[in-house]
Amino acid sequence: MSKDDLNDDLEEVLVEHATDGSKKTIFGRLRNYFFAGILVTAPIAITLYVTWGFLKFLDNKITPVIPYEINPNTYLPVDIPGLGLIIAIVFFVIVGWLTRNYFGRLIVRISENIVNRVPVINTIYGAVKQIFETVMASKSDAFKEVVMFEYPRKGIWVLGFVTGVTKGEVQSLTDSETVNVFLPTTPNPTSGFLLFVPKKDLTYMKMGVEEGIKMIVSGGIITPQEK
């Protein structure tokens, strides 16, 4: 079934639900139609609003940096929405291409050597670089598995995301094989806790990471179907 079919089915269910209840008064039917309309249009409106806001943010930050002579908005009657995003993508592609050749790698090594000699900054740079390399590496298992475990006490279950296998001193001080688990908060999944949980105490879920995030952000309102 395609995404369009699912959207059509959703609209039919909402309309049917709106017409089933509160048939005694016209105000009841109007109220149900009103809420059905919100459920259908709100996700689309919010998505468009967030996307447009992101594009405007990039345009406001990047477009002013472009020299006046080569800025397309200088010659066109209207501003090009998303110009900042296009420039950012082109910039990252060019930088990535440069780092693949000898001179690019040489410049990167020299820059890293300079940064590594500066106190405090070298610690921040090293930590941020390691995080990006771990998350973006294709062989990384970070945020690819959803797990359920008992926390903060027995009988209470939470959802978390596996970020890797525990290594180093943390693993050597534990008696069993331990897994790094990120426990996000609701409704903001970007904050949370890093837990070192014994692998035997984890229940690996069949749901995908995207489904798990939706469930956490919605506070359990959006619950994926059992696979």
Image: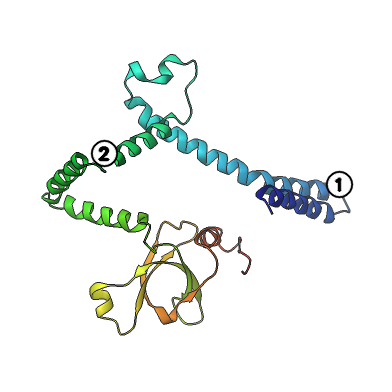
Quarter placement of the N terminus? bottom right
Q: How is the image coloured?
A: rainbow
Residue that carries the numbered disc 2 in the rendered image? 98
Residue that carries the numbered disc 1 in the rendered image? 26
Question: Does residue 132 appear to the left or right of 32 in the view shown?
Answer: left
Give coordinates of residue 109: x percent, y percent.
Answer: 16, 46
Which kind of residue does numbered mark 1 sit on?
A: Ile
Q: CA distance from mark 1 to mark 2?
A: 67 Å
For residue 93, the mark is none
Give coordinates of residue 102: x percent, y percent.
Answer: 19, 42
Q: Residue at x 63, y 45 (%)?
A: 42
Q: Residue at x 79, y 52 (%)?
A: 18
Quarter placement of the C terminus? bottom right
Which kind of residue does numbered mark 2 sit on?
A: Leu
Give coordinates of residue 110: x percent, y percent.
Answer: 14, 44
Residue 89, quarter of picture: top left
Q: Nearer the viewer, residue 123 or 217?
A: 123
Closest to the camera, between mark 1 and mark 2, is 2
Q: Secondary structure at mark 1?
A: helix
Labels 1 and 2: the sequence-earlier one: 1
Q: Are discs 1 and 2 less than 8 Å apart at CB?
A: no
| Farthest-out residue, left | 117
Q: Is residue 65 above or below residue 184?
A: above
